[in-house]
Image: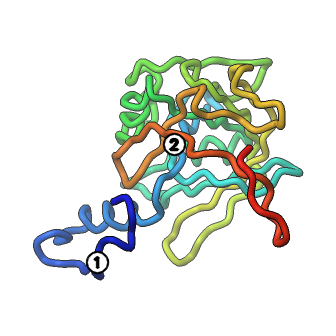
Amino acid sequence: MSDSNSKSLKLLKKSQDRLNNSRSWAQFVNSLSGYKSANLLSTKSKDEKENLSIVSSTVHLGSNPPLLGFIIRPHSEDHPRHSFENLESTGYFTLNHVSEAIYKKAHQTSARYPKEVSEFNETGLTPEYRKDFFAPFVKESYLQMGMKHIKTYFIEENKTNFVIGEVLSVYSLEEALRADGSLDLKKINTVALAGLDAYYTTEELGRLSYAKPDKELEEL
């Protein structure tokens, strides 16, 4: 759809034929927020067991200090959240961008492996340790962030946890860093995620100047 005004939009209803089970409803609601980030959350337990899981809810919370946050689904006996257990008990984790080259392996980390099984081993991704940082980075990722757990907020409404972490270190390809400090994510092939299982490559439409009420936007 090139022009939203050229089509007649209709209210999408939960119809019997299209959204007739919980999985269909989850797919529908997960698509409503649009394109999302795709990161691999890497942790290690106190007894040295490595864990890896994909998260699609990472958001920027502030630059000074540099904080990121993301949602982790509820922990239960039937659905244990090993990553959450590890980062809470050790205080450290890493976030690693998913690139076009590894998106299938990254998606496989969402499978429910037992705690003693490393998703690194199961998917063929490689743990990489840097400067004695406790949690492993993902070697195949072109943007890696060492994170310190700051706080977790429990969200009563749907029994999820909102995890806040501080960025302690960032590793990436030098050519991805622009002169103004921004990152050119296209150069490191970072992909976007929509819904529960759709991955997208991206094209930049353009960069615009800082918006002011008395000044027209300029292409950067």
Q: Position of residue 145 (x, y in %)?
A: 70, 33
x and y, in percent, of residue 40 in the image:
54, 36
Q: Residue furthest right?
A: 64
Disc on the earlier residue, 1 or 2: 1
Residue type, label 1? Ser
Closer to us: 7 or 192: 7
The residue located at (30%, 72%) in the rendering is 7
**Label 2: element kind:** loop
Give the residue number, with chain letter if any, for mark 1: 8
Closest to the observer, 17 or 139: 17
Identify the mark at residue 38; answer none if there is no mark: 2
Q: Position of residue 30 (x, y in %)?
A: 40, 61
Residue 173 left/right relative to 79: right
Give yes or no for contact between labels 1 and 2 (Cβ–Cβ under 8 Å): no
Q: What mark, if any, has residue 170 been given in the picture? A: none
Q: Is residue 147 above or below residue 6?
A: above
Residue name at image x 25 percent, y 62 percent: 23
Question: Where residue 202 sits in the image (x, y, percent)?
Answer: 49, 39
